[in-house]
Image (cartoon, rainbow, N blue to C red):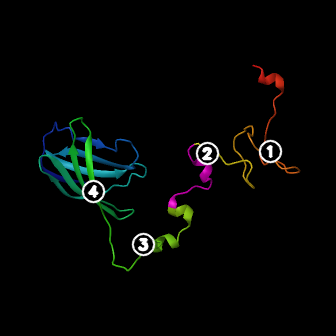
Amino acid sequence: MAKTSRTFPADHPLIGTWITDEEDSDTAFRFSLENNKLRVSGFCRSSGEEFEITHVKWDGMALSFIARFPATDTVTKNLFRMRPDGRGDLELTNYEVWKKKDVTPGEIPEAWRTRSPTVRFGATTRPLAHARGSEPSYDREGVVSRIHTKPHGRRPRAGRVKPHTHVRRSRASHKR
């Protein structure tokens, strides 16, 4: 649901649809004019679900509004300012409910205890394969290399079959 604010200039650079500079967010906010008043709306780019927008205020320098995303009940206070380079700065404040509880440093949060480490840390099923510059090692038990490489520095133990496929080249193919 979009909300409007007081009279706003039609040629203001804020008018349009805004996304993060690095395009790493699923959120978009649209600022438009309706009867010479600023209209603010927001939506999830992938699902199309709209934000509920309230408390829209333009003070001549910054646009502030509260956005609630119904799917997750996430509420944010947003303060949008134009930059000299034509981009915008969005100052974002999240609202969370906190409670008082005796906790000590080094104690694992309750919610983490009920989730698997994979979910908790966003890990994948093949963490080493996705690490920068890493591939699963062919000489570890049960690990299969996903690329065909020539082993350097280690030989398989006698009687053990290497768990990866290795294609040998003849000496002639090395003399290119």
- Decide which of tag 1 and tag 3 comes sooner along the chain: 3
Mark 3: secondary structure: loop
Cα distance between the residues tagged 2 and 3: 33 Å
Residue underneath mark 4: 1
Neighbours of disc 3 within 10 Å: few (<14), some (14-19), many (20+): few
Q: Amino acid at mark 1?
A: Arg
Give the number of the disc on residue 155: 1
- Furthest toward the right, the residue is 159
Q: Amino acid at mark 2?
A: Ser
Res. 121 in view: yes
Q: Total number of numbered labels?
A: 4
Quarter placement of the C terminus? top right
Residue 80, placed above or below residue 167: below
- Decide which of tag 3 and tag 4 comes sooner along the chain: 4
Residues at discs 1 and 2 in contact (Cβ within 8 Å): no
Give the number of the disc on residue 134: 2
Residue 33 in the figure: left or right of residue 131: left
- Furthest toward the front, the residue is 153
Q: Amino acid at mark 4?
A: Met
x and y percentages locating residue 47 in the rendered image: 42, 52
Give the number of the disc on residue 105: 3
Residue 170, placed above or below residue 146: above
Quarter residue 171 falls in:
top right
* Nearer the camera: disc 3 or disc 4: 3
